[in-house]
Amino acid sequence: MDTIILLDTSGSMAGKPIYELKRAVTAFLELIEELQLGERIALIEFGSRATVLSGLTNNYRHLKNIVNSLSAGGGTPMAEAMVLGTKIASEARVLNINGIIIVPRIILMTDGEPDNERDVLVVSQILGEASIPIACVGVAGCKAALMDSIANITGGMFIMAEDIALLQVFFIQQVFMIIYIMKMMDRIEELYNRELLRRFFEETTGSKVSDRELDAFVTMLSSLVKIEKQQNSNRINTSHKT
């Protein structure tokens, strides 16, 4: 699977927020590496400007070094970062595993309001039409209504981390979402079973899952995974999104 991560490194992230962001993304990368998921990750930051820090790669050591070097400063050019993410997503892999389609995703983290909200919504519409869901996580200071709109438009999810230290929980949950999909491949018809999903996340992450979070997970899963009806599908294919 391919994941594009958009990280807010604006001036308001200085101090503890940027520290917790680095800790959360590093934990995400280390868990993917430990579980040998082979997931390709791209990193984009938006602060002084929107910048692609790394294209899609599974060189996790390289990615962790980039994350460790992040610093905070500047505004919040979120729309520009989303445009960069759209370009990478257009070349990302769409997995076809015996007729089960898994699309790329974007993870977006922010603690503030974007420089241009209208442009953010326009790019969200483009991503929604391209079937690229965005998993949004916001911390204190973010415009929750806008994050909710991005999630709704793209078929993604929005979680508000009331405490910046809870960022790590969100990123760990994103790893286990892929594990859950893999686990359910042989019983895909139960993928959206709410009780199975709740039990899985609570047992694997050690954190309680609220009804709102559960709704968000179900929505994200329904956008990430599609079932393609085909008669002959005994092999695993990968294809590029066009």
Image (spheres, rainbow, N blue to C red):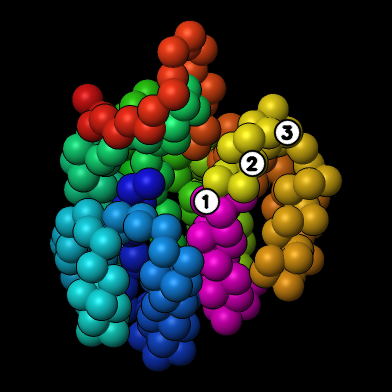
Coordinates of residue 219 in the picture (x, y in percent) = 62, 37
Boundaries of the magenta span:
162-180
Of residue 155 and residue 103, the one placed in the foreground of this image is 103
> Is 158 rendered above or below residue 27?
above
Is the magenta region chiefly helix, strand or loop? helix
Q: Which residue is mark 1?
A: 178
Instruction: Inspect the image, locate mark 1, and give the three-letter code of the amino acid beneath it.
Output: Ile
Circle 2/circle 3 CB separation < 8 Å:
yes
Instruction: Inspect the image, locate mark 3, and give the three-letter code of the amino acid beneath it.
Output: Glu
Residue located 49% across and 17% down the image: 228
Q: Which residue is mark 3?
A: 190
Residue located 52% across and 51% down the image: 178
Task: Give the quarter of the image for residue 30.
Answer: bottom left
Disc 2 is placed on an element classified as: loop
Q: Is residue 93 left or right of residue 97?
A: left
Q: Which residue is mark 2?
A: 184
Q: Residues within 10 Å of mark 3 (few under 14, many from 20)?
A: few
Q: Earlier in the sequence, mark 1 or mark 3?
A: 1
> Is 8 rendered above or below residue 78?
below
Whole-number angstrom distance, CA of label 1 to CA of label 2 = 10 Å
Instruction: Inspect the image, locate mark 2, and give the three-letter code of the amino acid beneath it.
Output: Met
Whole-number angstrom distance, CA of label 1 to CA of label 3 = 15 Å
Of residue 72 and residue 69, the one placed in the foreground of this image is 69
Task: Give the quarter of the image for residue 140.
Answer: bottom right
Disc 1 is placed on an element classified as: helix
> Is 166 rendered above or below residue 77?
below
